[in-house]
Amino acid sequence: MLCETRGVVQRRMLWVGLAAPLVGCGAGTAAADGRDRAATSGYLHAEYLFQQAAAKILPTAGVLSAEGLASTVGAECPGVVAGAPAGQQKSTLDLELVVAELRAVFAPLRPAVDRLAAETKRLRWDDRVLNRLVHANIAYGVSVLVAPSPSVCADMRAWVASGYRHVPAEARRLEQSLSLADTETPVRERMARYESPAERRLVRRTEAMTQATSGAYLPRYNATVAKVNAALGIPANHGIEPGHLKTPTPG
């Protein structure tokens, strides 16, 4: 169940789509098309700079931050959910754990996340569907990556103390805040109509850099996740393999 929960969060963490269908748009004015192209260009360059920062930070400070979470959990609540029953309540706490792990590894990247969010906030597309998708994705990404880390040990201890009957309110609220439809309608497909040939090349460079970054930090991150799971009493083999998760872009 934890592995399944982790997969759902990681698919959402690609931030290339939310629960909004692609709909046709009529022929816009030349001025509107120009504004959409300018906004797209601004977004793609901001995303590239974000991935440059991620390439430097995640394999070093990011992994160290995640390892700090493993040490904290090991000291505060060793074996807390060993033998706990599976079910929806356990899934809610699994989600909280996944988010805590992701926030730990991305914590040192907070300045880059803030810069990307600020840069994107000023961009506007006359394509209303694309405008809504991009800004909603940014808000969702920021809410996952940079909010305060949930109280994993405290919530798991409270659940165990209740006889596995009551999940703490904080864990339930987190689950509700992340309960977006998992449809992955790609923003990139809609944005592509406004990209120039040079920007398409930039997109390819960004994607290649994203994959390289994932390959650089995921092996150590997986090992750290395994430490966290073992400390909590969760069965092994819940990690993810490089290539299954891009370095997220909150937008």
Image (spheres, grey):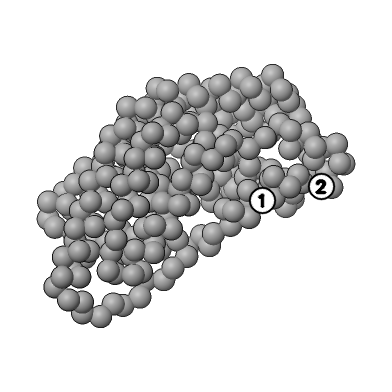
Left or right? Give the position of 5 relative to 91. Answer: left
Instruction: Out of 211 and 121, give the one closest to the viewer.
Output: 121
Q: Residue at x 21, y 42 (%)?
A: 205
Say whether marks 1 and 2 touch (CB < 8 Å).
no
Q: Seen from this angle, which residue lies furthest front? A: 122
Instruction: Out of 13 and 110, give the one closest to the viewer.
Output: 110
Report the amino acid beneath label 2.
His
Q: Seen from this angle, which residue lies furthest bottom? A: 26
Left or right? Give the position of 83 relative to 123. Answer: right
Mark 1 neighbour class, 10 Å CA radius: few under 14, some 14 to 19, many 20 or more: few
What residue would you read off at disc 2?
Answer: 166
Q: Which mark's residue is nearer the viewer, 1 or 2?
A: 1
Q: Quick check: can you spot residue 179? A: yes
Report the amino acid beneath label 1.
Arg
Q: Position of residue 167 (x, y in %)?
A: 77, 46
Q: CA distance from mark 1 to mark 2?
A: 13 Å
Q: Position of residue 128 (x, y in %)?
A: 33, 70
In the depicted structure, whether residue 59 falls above or below residue 138: above
Q: Considering only order in the chain, which callout, 2 or 1, is on the residue closer to the N terminus? A: 2
In the depicted structure, whether residue 179 falls above or below residue 85: below
What residue would you read off at disc 1?
Answer: 173
Of the numbered discs in the image, which one, if any, rests on residue 113? none
Q: Position of residue 25 (x, y in %)?
A: 28, 77
- Under circle 2, the secondary element is loop
Q: Residue at x 39, y 40 (%)?
A: 114
**Which image quadrant for residue 39?**
bottom left
Q: Position of residue 169 (x, y in %)?
A: 73, 47
Q: Quick check: can you spot residue 189? A: no
Q: Residue at x 22, y 64 (%)?
A: 36
Instruction: Out of 204 and 134, give the one closest to the viewer.
Output: 134
Mark 2 neighbour class, 10 Å CA radius: few under 14, some 14 to 19, many 20 or more: few
- Under circle 1, the secondary element is helix
